Amino acid sequence: MNVRITPRRFTGAFKIPASKSHTIRQLLIASLADGESVIKYPLDSLDTRSCLCACKAFGAEIAEQGDGEEISWKIRGNNGFKKGADPHTVIDVGNSGTTLYLALAVAGLQQNPIEFTGDEQIQKRSAAPLLDALAGLGVNSRSNNGCAPIMISGPWKGGRVSLPCPTSQYLSAILIAAPLASAGTVTEIEVPLLNEKPYIEMTLSYLKAHGIPYDTSPDFSFFSIPGGSCWKAVSSSVPGDFSSAAFPAAAAAITGGPVTLLGLDPQDTQGDKFFFEMLNKMGCNVQYNDNGENGQSITVSRGGSLRGGIFDLNKTPDLLPAAAVTAAFADGDTALVNVAHARIKETDRITVMTQELAKLGIRCTELPDGLVIHGKGALSSINSPVIDGHGDHRIVMSFAAAALGSPVPIEITTAECAAVTYPGFIEKVIG
């Protein structure tokens, strides 16, 4: 689907969708628990629907209640695979890399083979480091050079393995699954490389909340997780998603705003709240509001010019597209660095942003581990360009924000993929 976005000032108050990272973790944990859990206000998107289908394939019983912002999912877990999965189970994760990586480790807890597949992008995203680590723990796998389709089966025997993590999801996968190994089994993980550290802090917050023991070094370079634990059935709510909030926030920074973003908790473990610190340093006014019973909100506006800067995105690679389009409207250079792992997302986002910003007259210098955007303060007069969204939700949403500050309307391809994480965002931008 192509959309044509007309320039305008972007203002208003918007409820931010629930966190995809939290929703998927809560779904998997509830599916492995013994008893009935309720997830309130989850993200209902293409990616989380893929995870929901995976959980059903694992044997969880899931009932959906309500609709819109009042949705909740009631989940009766499979008691840590004690009931097992059906033989010859095939799980299609769609476009959800988070579901794929986390569910791969979970599948290693039981004997019956489970096959994972996904869309064209998923079939190009390698899980090889995770599969190698799982093999060292006794888990069997077959794959297409580390990519889907992937066949997984247990048993989980434990041991000591090395797991480099260009994506933190590899480590989160083992942290979620390892506690459910049989009593007396110990899983030890050496982590020579760890990107996206805040997502590990998020995963560990669930282990702590469920009373699951583990040991780790202060820098997260080593973990030891004993088996014999269980995930508990709980009732919980899902906080707003700072990753999704980056796009209306970028639109406010580009056009001036003000935009108020509802449902965000600044105390949450999500690393992508760093985007608001970036915007403040670039010249935006970022105000945190306490709305009493209605929770907290963040208001973003801009009166003066945006200015460039140097930002380390190692912990928050998903911010690169939104940060890059914002930097296109800044005066001077903006360097987004230490983020080579942005190349192994749905697309090589460093190269894609360089290519597509060039269509808006913005020159970028591509680095092995980042991007320098040579901002002009505004977009020059350009012919109405067609931006290729590359089927990547964050590319599409970042250029939707950029289009609002363009001197001419901009057309964006594959706009439907924004629904992977932020259903309704394109409609909000179109107005």
Image: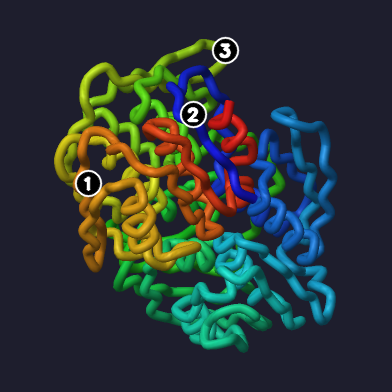
Front in this rendered view, residue 68 or 292: 68
Which residue has dot 2 on it?
264
Is 236 on the left-hand or right-hand side of 372? right
Q: Nearer the viewer, residue 336 or 262?
A: 336
Going by the numbered disc 2, the residue's amino acid type is Leu
- In the displayed structure, 142 sits above or below 369; it is below
Residue drawn at the location 36% of the way across and 52% of the way down: 359
| Residue ID for mark 3 | 293
Quarter that holds the C terminus: top right
Nearer the observer, disc 2 or disc 1?
1
How dense is the environment of label 1, judged by Cα within 10 Å: few (below 14), some, or many (20 and up)? some
The percent coordinates of residue 39 (x first, y second) are 70, 40
How far, Cα to Cα, is label 3 from label 1? 35 Å
| Residue drawn at x 48%, y 24% as measured from the top left | 261
| Distance between the alpha carbons at the discs numbered 2 and 1 | 22 Å
Per the rendering, the mark at residue 311 is 1
Q: Amino acid at mark 3?
A: Glu
Task: Where is residue 198? Give x, y as percent.
Answer: 38, 50
**Along the polypeptide, which appears first: circle 2 or circle 3?**
2
Q: Residue at x 84, y 45 (%)?
A: 63
Task: Tell me which label, 2 or 1, sits earlier in the chain.
Answer: 2
